[in-house]
Image: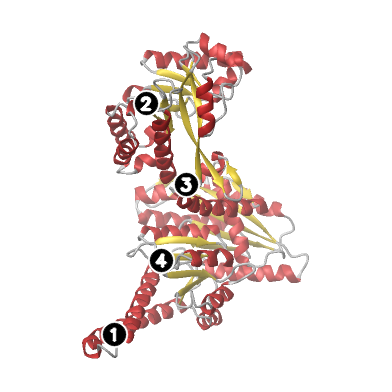
Amino acid sequence: MNYERLEADKKDILLIDDMAVNLRVLSAILAREGYNVRKALNWQMALTACQTVLPDLILLDIMMPEVDGYEVCQRLKASQLTADIPVIFISALDDVFDKVKAFSVGGVDYITKPFESEEVLVRVQNQLALRTAQLEILKLNAELEQRVQQRTSELEKALHKLQGEVTYRKHLQSKLLDIALHDSLTGLPNRILFIRRLEKALNSAKQEPNYHFAVLFLDCDRFKVINDSLGHLVGDELLRAIARRLQACLKPVDTLARLGGDEFAILLENLTDISIAIKLAESILQQLSLSFQLSRYEVFMNASIGISWGNKDYDRPEYLLRDADTAMYRAKAQGRARYYVFDPVMYQEAIQILELENDLRRAIERQEFLVYYQPIISLSTGRISGFEALVRWQHPIRGLVSPIEFIPVAEETGLINAINTWVLRSACQQLSIWQHYPVTPEPLTISVNLSARLFLQPDLLVQIDQIIEETKVNPAYLELEITESVIMENSNAVRIILQQLKQRKMKLVMDDFGTGYSSLSYLHSFPLNALKIDKSFVKRMQENQENMGLVPAMIGIADSMGMVVIAEGVETKEQLLQLRSLNCNFAQGYFFARPLEQQSVIKLLAASPQW
């Protein structure tokens, strides 16, 4: 096993929690502070993570299925490998009994949900400092006999530091025990009190077959925009106004809580049907659509609502809140200002996405990616003029994973940068090899897609220059494909980068033209060499005669600006003939060939096909 540190000066923190939302939030908080953060959904994943690289600190949730946090901590302390790793418990449980039990099984600290990012960072820093001090003390003790006089002063300093950290930790623990059950801004119940009432409702459902309840999870849309533009004082005033308006929609027996930020939760008890919860959600959405008359501003606000139907099958109250939260995110994904009722399939999808993210990180380390190549055909000669590099993931268990499945996750997590750079280097290396084969046509180009995220890297040009230098390819044969979103999101910075790429003789291609903003103004402002017509337009050429005008118009636009046109998704001979009649320059698609592995490309070039 490899138990070396990832980086000598970068602390490694392992998060163990079955709730993907908690993992995302904690990971974001800690990563921003420079920590290396890894995530595990259960005991098995945690054990594997520890065996791979020993973490400096573990943040552990108590309430998890199958093996709870107490048992996980006991197992960690029972193992010689992990016994000394400090464990901080993070839980919504706030009873003294739960905290005592957490410390009795080996925990060093206890953070009660909902947590504040500042508190989490302070506690993490304290425990890492404690761990460092403890290691210093061990070192001092090992050398004590030989260097007593020399190390006495250092030992006293380390002990003094340790005593200070312990005193500070006890002070924070004391403050945690005094946390109130109500939100100081709105006066509403906070997460702790809401969970307790939710637990009581769940117990009632287990004891009374006819008892039903529902949880509504509400997140304000556009609140951050208002908060950032008008200031936090206005944001706080708006939150109090939202709380009052929500309270007016409820009965006295209902529970409304502020969970933190702009998130609210509602517990509806003694329901006969979920339609009651749905009607309430519709009423809330209607009320929140009305303007808020604040002291200095008139503000408009919407919300997305997730609904979870409570029943006795739930083991923990937190799972109900988690499912309502998941449904809320689905409502946001569908356009916001609406509600969505939780379906159990949604939780499995969230888990699968998290597992996919973890697998992607390992895939980058293990270089599990492959590059396939799809030929690009010159319609004037009918012969191959180049190839587009397309990434594939050879998963060790699932086999080839479609880019449609893993690229969005890679984009969201930022892993796309490492993947994109690897594909660019691999494609250039392959082009350099192919150019030495006698069957390779001259010139042969290679096209590589560049992610929008890649343009946020300050050293993008340095990386590209390094790849060109390493592979010794002629940059004039390298075509870089970008989408409309790349230049629309940060146009000034991207324009400078594209101009510098153009100066290096590289070709710039606008991919999926017509599917995004469809604004012609940027075409005049950016140094593009070619437009790539999306396959959806090529497909509709034959399906509907009225849509035939789109492809000729795109070709005309490109021609008027001195650009060439590449048509994607050519699957039939009829499409090929139509594109030729429209004077389209290049085409690619299954009619010519599917994406090919390296050896198949050589065979295709040797065959010298002509269409």
As helix, strand or loop, the secondary structure at mark 2 comes to helix
Distance Cα–Cα, label 1 vs label 3: 45 Å
Q: Which residue position is annotated with label 4?
A: 4
Comes first in the chain, label 2 or label 1? 1
Distance Cα–Cα, label 4 vs label 2: 43 Å
Task: Name which residue lies at 29% across and 85% down.
Answer: 160
Comes first in the chain, label 2 or label 3? 3
As helix, strand or loop, the secondary structure at mark 3 comes to helix
Distance Cα–Cα, label 3 vs label 4: 29 Å
Q: Which residue position is annotated with label 3?
A: 412
> What's under tag 4, amino acid-wise?
Glu
Q: Tag on residue 477?
A: 2
Q: Position of residue 333 (x, y in %)?
A: 55, 44
> What's under tag 2, amino acid-wise?
Tyr
Question: Taking 78 as reference, is 313 left or right?
Answer: right
Question: Taking 164 as reference, is 202 left or right?
Answer: right
